[in-house]
Image (cartoon, rainbow, N blue to C red):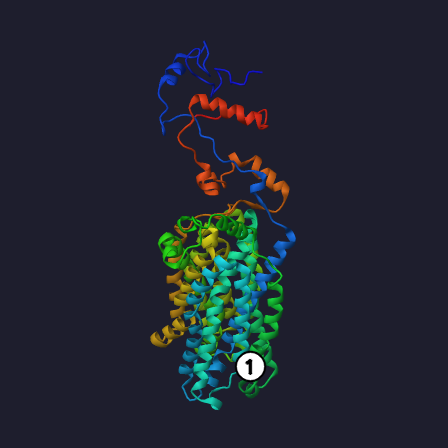
Amino acid sequence: MNDSASPSEPGAPTGAPGQPGGSEGSHPAQNSASEKPRKAGAKGFALPRRRLEFDDVTVVEDSMLKRAIGGTVVGNLMEWYDVGVYGYLAVVIGKMFLPDASPTAQNLFSLGVFATTFIARPLGGIVLGQLGDRLGRQKILAFTLLMMATATFLIGVLPDATVIGWVAPIALIVLKLVQGFSTGGEYAGATTFITEYAPDKRRGFFASLLDMGSYFGFAIGAAFVSVLQLTLSEDFIEGFGWRIPFLVALPLGAIALWFRLKIEDSPTFQAAQDEQHEAEDAAAHDAEAPKGLGSLLRTYWRELLVAFILVAAANTLGYALTSYMPTYLTSTLGYDAVHGNLLTLPVLVVMSACIPLVGMLSDRIGRKKVLFIASISGMVLSIPAFLLMMHGAVWSTLMGLALLAVPVAFFVANLASSLPALFPTASRYGGMGISYNLAVALFAGTAPFYMEALVAITGSPLAPGVWVVLTSAAGLIATVFLRESAGRPLPGAMPSVMTDEEAHELVAGQDENPDLDSSDLFGDEAKVEGPLHPDDHADEQRRRREEGGAPGDKPMAPA
């Protein structure tokens, strides 16, 4: 069998008669081409590139994926349980820790204390994010959960202002700052963890479970407070009853910590760590090595900015619907505390159940399209939502809350899968920690305070809706610059699938797969020095046949 291709075939070896690779019947054009010197960078035949192999593909173990989801979801549920409890008790807490102030001042104090939580979050995100990229996601996530549960429990045993005077509000602020520091590493770490575990084609669905847990956690906290308010007297609630939900956080945290200690760092992170240890001396110059804060900001400032704006837009809506609504319905619209709390519960439960459905939708049509829907619906529906709530009837309030929940569901179901895909493995936790927590601190977690202040300044109950429209418009602009990541491997990671069959199919169809890019997967390994000379092209074809290439392998096409 002749090892060289026929002269009539594309990619046939050429050369002068009598030379290796040449033939007496070579075409004149081929002869003249072969006489030219080999010139690096000249247009010629396609270059050999590093090809995806079966061993490159990460096949996700079903049992490990379930443990990873369970361990991250329960921690996020715990975080938002505290948000729900504090949000629904904000009016009572204002009375307990600032008893001599006016109702407006008490509300602003309580919401301001809530906002202080988010002042510490960027610091927590920076410190814990950097540690998570170096020590491992699992260790830091266990630490954040322990801190969060302990601080929440201590709020439950903190004496109020009638007992220790001015020390009480200061101690409350300190404990909320501790909570903020710990939660600064919680969501960023949890999203990083779950996206690294999830298979590429279903990352939107699995990552959305994290936010479903968040909002269910809020609903559980809110429901707990509502049940206490319905079954206990107002005097008892303002005496000891308000402490009960905070005290429950300790046993809940212990259960969540047990789940979290059962999980391991993702294969993607472990592979990145192995590569880092093997090339420790070169790590400081490696784009894939964990970066310090300054280097992270210089290298990924565009990605950080896009993530920052999207988080601000999404969480302004999210916190408006959750933390701010009880205060808005009671203080601004005149509902009693029980009805102000209860009206949001059914909307939250239905919205939480819909979040995984939106995550599945993003796997099908893409993250950007879903985020466009979120931004536009936030701009279009927010004003009508607040107008319906201002109507005053229960039915109109429920409709207004439901309208506000639509953009929230489309936003939050996508952030956990979209944002970690902006950063490579070695800098993912740190990048998420900075962008997410800084945005939450400046815009999202402080949204209830801003909105209540806008109502107080303008005297208009519609002012919060205008604020939501503006932040949603910013989210629309950021979505334009977002890189589509649906169905694609994470930066710095190999493709991830659920089964061996999927892995074989992926390898076999890699040349036709638009979601695979060898330069993204292999970096410098996908490059060679200069183009193939026609003589070398025959050697490459021969090498592929000797290595067992398929009989139907096509010759390498001209570049």
Q: Tell me the residue that label 1 is attached to.
A: 243
Q: Residue at x 40, y 25 (%)?
A: 44
- Picture quarter with the C terminus: top left
Is 295 rendered above or below residue 184?
A: above
**Relative image position of residue 80 (x, y in whole percent):** 53, 68
* Quadrant location of the N terminus in the rendered image: top right
Horizontally, residue 42 falls left or right of residue 59, namely: left
* Residue type beneath disc 1: Arg
Viewer-proximal residue among 287 and 470: 287
The residue furthest right is: 63
Spot the residue most to the top. Answer: 24
Q: Residues within 10 Å of mark 1 (few under 14, many from 20)?
A: many
Task: State the image quarter where residue 500 is shown.
Answer: top right
Looking at this view, name the residue that lies furthest to the bottom: 163
Q: Nearer the viewer, residue 10 or 336?
A: 10
Left or right, 106 with respect to 207, comes to left
Percent from the top left, x then y, of residue 502? 61, 41
Residue 202 in view: yes
Q: Secondary structure at mark 1?
A: helix
Which x, y percent locates residue 372?
44, 53
